[in-house]
Image (spheres, rainbow, N blue to C red):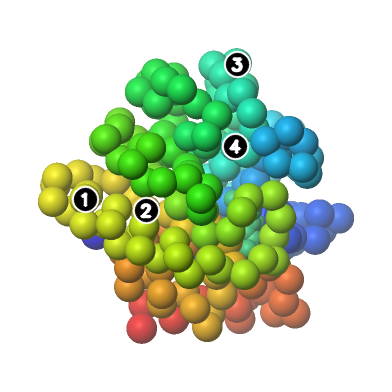
Amino acid sequence: MGKIKLAPSILSADISNLYNDVRRAEDAGAEYLHIDVMDGHFVKNITFGTNVVSALRDKSKMVFDVHLMIDNPNEDNINAFRRAGADIITVHAEVVHDLEGISKIIRNTGARAGISINPDTPLDTIIGQAKSFDMVLLMTVVPGLGGQAYIHSVTRKIEELKRYIDEQGLDIDIEVDGGINAQNINIPVMAGANVIVAGSAVFGCADISATVMELREAKNG
Ligand code: DX5
Ligand code: ZN
């Protein structure tokens, strides 16, 4: 397994001060920036579009990890997010029928392809096609909102996916998203996750830098 990466989610950032928050996370050592795109259909909220990705692109060297919580991810919007500066584009298996096809569309743009499943979606839905992707994102909360509690039943899915990846000798990242903080980060990390999203834990606290460092230490310790 590669080095563990921390991916602060700007969903919980101070949007009126977005650049400052992103800068703090990056300066403190966060490797990825997790950008939650919500369409008001797949989930209730509506959040960021390509304009936010491109506005930040010139100002940050972090890997831009775009999580598309949208009903109908298609070539047009995938191309648009790539053009805006996405490095990884992740779609949800619940709304994609042709997993291999969508992976090709994403990879053809030059981005890395991610596939995500909700806590209630069985791993079987995607495991056979996991090899078409660079990353599997296991949601550890029901998507739509920051600040929810980590759903412990997903830990077994992380372990199962990790076992499968190792047995098959695949090179696929396991990302986890939702409810992760310095107190529980070791649970998904021990289970095999290597890309760790943290929204409210990072941006909802008084000292972003200290929290990023604390999370980075916890995951390494
Ligand atoms: C939830 C989003 C998450 C969210 C995580 O639907 O996909 O990325 O920002 O927030 P926390 O870390 O606060 O659970
Ligand atoms: Zn997310």
Q: Upstream in the sequence, badge 1 or badge 2?
A: 1
Out of 21 and 48, give the one closest to the viewer.
48
Image x and y of residue 26, in percent:
57, 62
Q: Which mark is residue 217?
A: none
Where residue 158 appears, as percent x and y from the top left, is 35, 59
Q: Amino acid at mark 3?
A: Asp
Mark nearest the camera among 1 and 4 is: 1
The residue lying at 51 percent from left, 50 percent from top is 120
Q: Which mark is residue 76?
A: 3
Gap in angstroms between the C-alphas marked 1 and 4: 25 Å
Report the residue marked by disc 1: 164
Q: Secondary structure at mark 4?
A: strand
Residue type (three-letter) at the residue carrying disc 4 = Leu
Residue on which the image places disc 4? 68
Residue at mark 2: 174
Which is more foreground, mark 3 or mark 1? 1
Crowding around mark 1 (Cα neighbors within 10 Å: few <14, some 14 to 19, many 20+) is some
Residue at screen point 71% across, 55% down = 145
